Amino acid sequence: MTTLSDCQALDAQDPLRSLRDLFALPDGTIYLDGNSLGMMPRTTPERVADVVTREWGQDLIQSWNKAGWFAMPLAVGDKIARLIGAGAGEVVAADSTSINLFKVLSAAIHIAQADAPQRTKVVSERSNFPTDLYIAEALCQQHGLELVLVETEDIAESLSADVAVLMLTHVNYRTGAMHNMAAVTAAAHAEGILTVWDLAHSAGAVPVDLRSAKADFAVGCGYKYLNGGPGAPAFVWVNPQHADRCWQPLAGWWGHAAPFAFTPDYQPAAGIARYQCGTQPMISLAALDCGVDTLLATEALGGMAALRTKSLALTDLFIRLVEERCDGHGLGLATPREHAQRGSQVCLSRQEGAYAIVQALIARGVVGDFRAGDGGRHPDILRFGFTPLYIGFEDVWNAVEHLRQVLHSGEWQDARFARQHAVT
Ligand SMILES: *Cc1c(COP(=O)(O)O)cnc(C)c1O
């Protein structure tokens, strides 16, 4: 049996322990929701205040040049590139994940059909994050294509000669299951199919190597593991072999080769710069820069590989403690046990009461979240994200102890925990 002092010993030996000092950790909270909204870095309030009071308040429009505002989407993109195996100048921080997905999926469809007009299908997983499916549905409508949604185990056999694009999320938001990006991409390419990867639950959470996986397009989220703050800009990567092949559909002036030439016709910028649309939200982008810096701080301590080692140790420990200490309470494991198939979260399933149990845990300061079973096709999920930058092994112990008490006492059945909020 694992004990509290075992967990404390793991914290004492943790080479990444000091990184939690980069964050403003709220008292009395064990935050297991960094996969949904990352923690605020300590540097963010001052940086945002400086952008507002000095760069905007004093320097006003000169800040586009003087403070480097104009170059920031690509500068932050270069930092994110280091976390996802992309090269410098290949990533831009812009817009939202949904919007970036619209851009890259459009481009992928355009390129695929230019090469092979008989490819009339876009394939994705039924369990993909809904916004990804909605964007794909809208684009398929526009282009007269068919969106084919398959179960995870049926992806391989769905890759046929009439498929244009395979669009997947690398780590599943509900279950934490992770695809083998290189293998899936190779299987798609073997059939002449382009790949679009959503890294919303991967960037800053697990090692990603877009270049060696030979992926075609990728997007990802700024406010989850990148700690960029609510509504932070997202990012987009396009394999350099495709970047100049077509316009992206939101051909705004920020993606123009010379926005300040003010020409009436569009000339796309070279490379990833054309995947910008309009003026970036500078206050949010500055906050994202602070968030990304917390991940780059790991580079001196072993980088994403070291984060991954700790992440797996945290999720292994959580699974083990739940099984040792919460046995007999109807919890199932919805996340794969195999390390190669697991992201940085653990999802527990329960036939009933999942929502109320999560609410009871939040009332005790253990913040996870709830995801509804897919129209009854799957049980409801209690979801716990483990951000190795700021979560420790004793936190895992305490979280499971709270869960044990909530289940054992039945306190989750209290009526106040059944009340539904707009955002779960
Ligand atoms: C969080 C998430 C998004 C979020 O999209 P927004 O445009 O930022 O609202 C998209 N896709 C996936 C897979 C996500 O996990």
Image (cartoon, rainbow, N blue to C red):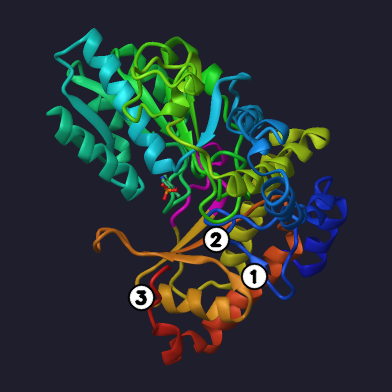
Q: Is residue 35 left or right of residue 147?
A: right
Q: Is residue 342 magenta?
A: yes
Callout 2 environment at 10 Å: few (<14), some (14 to 19), or many (20+)? Answer: many
For the point 46% across and 40% down, the residue is 95
Amino acid type shown at disc 1? Ala
Does label 2 point to a residue whose CB lies under 8 Å from ligand 1? no
Q: Quadrant of the C terminus?
A: bottom left
Residue that label 2 marks: 384
Most prominent secondary structure in the magenta stretch? loop
Real-space Cα separation, disc 2 to disc 3, in angstroms: 17 Å
Question: In the image shown, does 169 or 423 lie closer to the viewer?
Answer: 423
Going from N to C along the chain, the mark reached first, 1 or 2, is: 2
Packing grade of label 3 (10 A; few <14, some 14-19, many >=20) is: few
> Mark 3 near ligand 1 (CB under 8 Å)?
no
Q: Position of residue 187 (x, y in %)?
A: 36, 19
Point out residue 402 in the picture as x, y percentages from the top left corner: 62, 77
Three-letter residue code for mark 2: Phe
Locate residue 253 relative to residue 394 in the image: left or right: left
Helix, strand or loop at label 3? It is loop
Q: Which of the pair 97/174 is nearer the observer?
A: 97
